[in-house]
Image: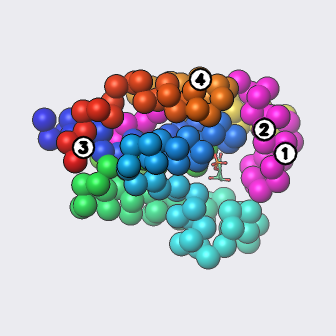
């Protein structure tokens, strides 16, 4: 019973860059009256630098260290105050084994926003603040490398849907109504 409750108090959205995690998490949290946490935002606040700056000045390894630290912090906070949270993870968060282990131990629910690569390419080509979007070939390669990690999520949602329908699909998974706040 206890782990069942914990399971539904921390719901994390995962998926590749451009899959709509931040928007969906914000809308879901507002709909449910839950707290919204954006892991990328936590990282930039902790570092006092933007994500492209962290990658350029400190490198990806340091970015991953801060990412893990911030994830551990937010999992601990969720355990302490028991408030339900919707978290948008970064596109690479679950590809780090220590992060996946932490999420599993915490009883978090993982929802994969799955979007076709062609659609992701269109979306990400218009945004220039993603250090791991260098060119189409490496983007496609990274997508393939990440798929096995996303496939470990508890639920998969087609995120090529318009945002309102996407949120509707997540709500209809039936994992929110059972929360005891
Ligand atoms: C990353 C995705 C980004 C951000 C960082 C690294 C990745 O998050 O965490 O640039 O490794 O795929 P979004 O998926 O929110 O763009």
Mark 3, ligand 1, within 8 Å: the answer is: no
Residue count near mark 2 (Cα–Cα under 10 Å), binned few <14, some 14–19, many ≥20: some
Residue 149 in the image: x percent, y percent?
Answer: 53, 33
**Which residue corresponds to mark 3?**
6
Identify the residue shown where x is 78% and y is 42%.
124
User: Could you say which disc has been placed on residue 126 in the image?
Assistant: 1
**Which residue corresponds to mark 4?**
158
Residue count near mark 4 (Cα–Cα under 10 Å), binned few <14, some 14–19, many ≥20: some
State whether residue 181 appears in this view: yes
- Circle 2 SS class: helix
Mark closest to the chain's N terminus, 4 or 1: 1
Q: Which residues are magenta?
A: 107-136
Q: Are marks 2 and 1 in contact (CB under 8 Å)?
A: yes
Q: Are marks 4 and 1 in contact (CB under 8 Å)?
A: no
| 129 lies above or below 175 | below
State whether residue 145 appears in this view: no
Residue 21 in the image: x percent, y percent?
Answer: 58, 42
User: Could you say which disc has been placed on residue 123 in the image?
Assistant: 2
Residue count near mark 1 (Cα–Cα under 10 Å), binned few <14, some 14–19, many ≥20: few
How far apart marks 2 and 3 lie (CA) works out to 34 Å
Mark closest to the chain's N terminus, 4 or 3: 3
């Amino acid at each position: 019973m206890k782990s069942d409750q914990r399971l539904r108090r921390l719901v994390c959205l995962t998926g590749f860059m451009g899959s709509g995690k931040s928007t969906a998490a914000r809308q879901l949290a507002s709909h449910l009256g839950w707290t919204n946490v954006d892991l990328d935002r936590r990282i930039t606040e902790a570092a006092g630098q933007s994500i492209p700056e962290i990658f350029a000045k400190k490198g990806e390894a340091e970015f991953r260290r801060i990412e893990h630290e911030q994830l551990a912090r937010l999992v601990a906070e969720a355990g302490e105050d028991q408030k339900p949270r919707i978290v948008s993870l970064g596109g690479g968060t679950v590809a780090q084994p220590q992060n996946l282990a932490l999420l599993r131990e915490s009883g978090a629910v993982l929802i994969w926003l799955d979007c076709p690569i062609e659609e992701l390419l269109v979306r990400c080509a218009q945004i220039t603040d993603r250090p791991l979007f260098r060119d189409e070939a490496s983007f496609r390669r990274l997508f393939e490398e990440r798929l096995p990690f996303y496939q470990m999520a508890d639920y998969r949602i087609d995120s090529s849907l318009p945002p309102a329908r996407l949120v509707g699909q997540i709500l209809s998974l039936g994992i929110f109504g059972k929360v005891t706040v």
